[in-house]
Image (tube, grey):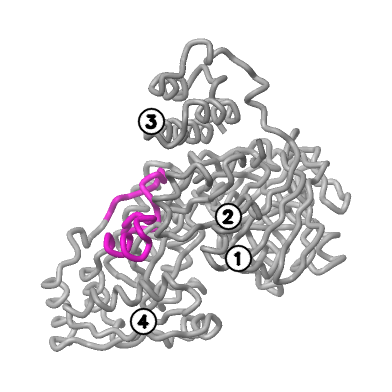
Amino acid sequence: MKRLQEEQVADLVGKFKRGLITRRELLAGLSVLGGLTAVSGAIPALLRSAGVEGTLLRPTAALAAPKRGGTITAATIDKPVNMDPAFAELYSSMQVYQNVFSKLVYVDRNYKFVPGLAKSWRQVNPTTWEFDLVDNAWFHNGEKFSAADVKYTFDRLFDKKLGAANAVFLSPMEGSEVVSPTRIRIITKPNWGGLIASLAAVLEVVNKKAIESSDPKLKPVGTGPFRLVEWVKDDHITLQRWDRYFKSGRPYVDRVIFKAIANDTVRLTGLQKGELNWVEQVPLQMVKDFKQSTQVKANPDGAFFPDLFLINSTKPPFDKKEVRQALSWALNRKAIADLVWHGQAMPSAEALAPTNPLYSGSNPFEGAPNVAKAKDLLAKAGYPQGLKAVFAAQPQVPTQVQVGQLVQQMLKPVGIDIEVRSFESARWFEELATKRYDFTSTYWSATLDPEHCYFPLGHSKSPWNFAGYGDPELDAALEKFRFTVDPVARKRAYGDVVRLMALGAPVVFQVNFIRTYWTQPKVMGAATLPSLELRMEDVWIS
């Protein structure tokens, strides 16, 4: 919370220095944030830079305390469809149910893993981990949480009859054992380096009685800070504070109402009118202006959302590596970031942003766009006169269409003639799954650990390998990265994965979208997390 407080104070001080708010408004905002009580860290220096010092720095703890009560009405982009966390069906579903369930482990904005249902954990040997669990957590159906629930969650996830999508992220697990009601043992393949990150990213703990007594897709029952009390299809979902939540004092608000509003402008209008007090995104072309506004608040953001090209490597013309590499040399990532994302994205040749401790900075195509190199590669591939290809786009995803149109212009000087062809979402996914498409773009929402992105998309035996790519050298690099525990060696192994994926080019990363949550000024505690969770238990209304 301290880092988040410092970021919010810095934002207020910046607005004051630019003349966007008065000194009185600055002091009022600092009081709400508890910034005037800070006696260590970066905040005192920020206050002095704004001419706010002296007696204002004396501790006044009452000002720093978050308030309880109130309702957050939040507008996400898409409609939730499935509340069973084993499937992770649509990010919009996850945004809701991650507030209903709890995880063993969480991650903060600084990539530090922090306790959830697990108070502590340790690696016993290369294949064994033990987790000590809280003994004061209760499911929303009245069942007390124990290690048996964790084991049931794992067993259910790996049940082949269920066909759970999230199992792929935990596939190095060999099993779990209940040591006691408050201790669970996890058995993995030797030296799996991504276990803790995987638990923080994808594992919500479920209860057997709840799963078997009702449809988990419609009636989620967890130990989380909120319980689902109403789901009006195609309209809203209401979550109510769970009074037996195991974290003392949380959550702060009484309820959270989720509404799905696809149109950016409609969401923004609702925020300005006070009908909403939290929205996922505003029109990208308006972000810079609204970051200077005092009417709405841009909360601490993060570039945790990569956008990428999927390139079908199983059929002409992209079955030849040289053609895929030609596309990479023709790309102008900065133009994509500026023209499609209106500067709200960072050009990136890998899944991670520089803030991630594992970030490699590797880019074999440094210096692109380079038309001459791209043309040479096309000639080597047997296309000296150029070629034609189809970019698959979904009309309901405007940025995807815009990326296709921009890449169409980028590839034309190289000799690649692109048709941007529209497919409805179901047909678009069918094109990917059946390998009928040529190439497309999409986002990937699981990048807390790069294993969650590169392994499913790049390993030859992964069911999520939509490019149909197979390279023994990349497979070996992925395995080495996955099964390395030492942080230094793991980062080095990740760099090899980035390089080999880039050179093979079945997946080509374009940008990392800078995700910002927007609120009314009195809403505190909202921030983008590396796990992309909406952690509403931290949010409060001043």
Per the rendering, the mark at residue 279 is: 2
Q: In the image, is residue 108 above or below residue 10?
A: below
**Of the residues under marks 4 and 2, which one precedes in the sequence?**
2
Q: Residue 474 in the image: state x and y as whole percent.
A: 35, 65
What secondary structure do most residues of the magenta stretch adopt?
loop
Amino acid at pointer 4: Phe
Q: Nearer the viewer, mark 1 or mark 4?
A: 1
Amino acid at pointer 3: Lys
Q: Nearer the viewer, mark 4 or mark 2?
A: 2
* Quadrant in the rendering for residue 402: bottom left
The residue pinned by badge 3 equals 17
Position of residue 355 in the picture relative to residue 181 (left or right): left
* Label 3 secondary element: helix
Q: Residue 521 in the image: state x and y as whole percent.
A: 57, 41
Q: Determine the CA span between mark 2 and mark 1.
A: 9 Å
Q: Determine the CA span between mark 4 and mark 2.
A: 31 Å
State yes or no: discs 2 and 1 in contact (Cβ < 8 Å).
Answer: yes
State yes or no: discs 3 and 4 in contact (Cβ < 8 Å).
Answer: no
* Quadrant in the rendering for residue 324: bottom left
Q: In the image, is residue 519 above or below residue 319?
A: above
- Sort mark 1 into few (<14), some (14-19) or many (20+) by Cα contacts within 10 Å: many
**Quadrant position of the C terminus in the picture:** top right
- In the rendered image, residue 232 lying in the magenta stretch gets the answer no
Per the rendering, the mark at residue 391 is: 4
**Of the residues under marks 3 and 4, which one precedes in the sequence?**
3
* Label 4 secondary element: strand
**Of the residues under marks 2 and 3, which one precedes in the sequence?**
3
**Of the residues under marks 3 and 1, which one precedes in the sequence?**
3
